Amino acid sequence: MGGMDTFESLVRAEFTPKTTYLNTASNGLLPARAVAALHEAALLRAEGRPLTPLHEDVEACRAAYARLAGVPVARVALGASVAAHTGLIAASLPAGAEVLTAEDDFTSVLNPFHVRGDLKVRAVPLERIAESVRPGTALVAVSAAQSADGRIADLPALREAARAHGARTYVDFSQAAGWLPTDAGAHDFSAAVSFKWLLGPHGAAFLVVPEDFGGLAPILAGWVAGEEPWDSCYGPVAELARSARRFDLTPALFSYAGLRRSLELIEELGVAEIGAHALALADRFRAGLAALGREPLPAPGSAIVSVPGLGSRQGELAAAGVQVSDRSGNLRAAFHLYNTPADVDRLLDVLSG
């Protein structure tokens, strides 16, 4: 069997959508192996058996994400949401610090800096973010791929500009990790949720911190953040974990049980292969839109395609069994490993009708 045959047979074994599902930018589909693992995890609890395997799943997910993100496992912390990770970073900044953001980026990347009330938060168009870093910028916070329209940030340029001005960088890979090669090691901080392109359940999110922790205080640390968690259940934690695990939240065990299998699938298929597959479908959709006289928002090299003026047709598409999003009047379609040329053609067919 050739590589493409293996890819397709693996995908077909794992996914059986009952709709034309083009909405991964909202939620990814769960592979069959993750569903089976969730079922098994629930049975452990229901039957009163030891939960040791679920704690092993947590550490397997940390290691798998570290490989995916290209960082040592000691830099990876586990939490529940990007917003909570952003809040941890926001809490570490001194009063008056300047945070540079992209206009209309996803709220979870931005809002914790605003609610502080004593930070200078500056928003610029995404295309100008690298050139807008200046002396006195403490942190640049941006999504690798924009949720609303799929635009890809020029992260290498941003990194160079930040380095030149002594600023730190914080990148949200939620709409990128799983299809776009992720170089988290190039940034001070980064985060990603697990329920989009990583195909996991809700309730898990990753945070990558510098090896020296970048000035973060473990203000949310509970017993799991101890170097010896089971010896840290009573009284203050005697010794915090020497790794990024000091920033862990108590894990949603079922989520990690399912996510472990989802991450294994992504590793088996390969992010580069998944990305090439998704981009080919996105380009097929862009070409089809041109034939319909429609112009998507420019987002070259993105698996997310957003089309102005068509968002109102989301309900009609859903009724026809095609799942997409309506974002600010734009129709947003997102392409992932389980999508096929037939899915693209079905979407175009309904739109042209």
Image (cartoon, grey):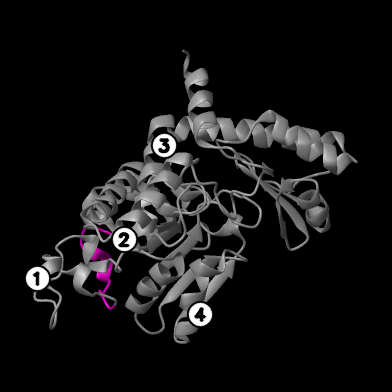
Q: Sequence order check: which comes first, mark 2 or mark 3?
A: 2
Q: Sequence order check: which comes first, mark 2 or mark 4?
A: 2
Judged from this view, the residue extending furthest toward the top is 1
Residue type, mark 3 in image: Leu
Q: Residue 345 shows which numbered tag?
A: none
Q: How many residues crowd around disc 3 within 10 Å: few (fewer than 14), some, or many (20 or more)?
A: some
In this view of the protein, which residue sits in the foreground, 74 or 136?
A: 74
Q: Quadrant of the C terminus?
A: top right
The local secondary structure at tag 4 comes to helix
The local secondary structure at tag 1 comes to helix
Magenta residues? 209-219
Residue type, mark 1 in image: Asp
Q: Position of residue 281 (x, y in %)?
A: 65, 33
Residue 216 falls in which quadrant of the image? bottom left
Label 3: which residue? 265
Q: Sequence order check: which comes first, mark 1 or mark 2?
A: 2
- Gap between marks 4 and 3, in whole Å? 38 Å
Q: Residue 114 shows which numbered tag?
A: 4
Residue 192 falls in which quadrant of the image? bottom left
The local secondary structure at tag 2 comes to helix
Residue at 34%, 61% (x, y): give it. Answer: 46
Q: Residue 45 shows which numbered tag?
A: 2
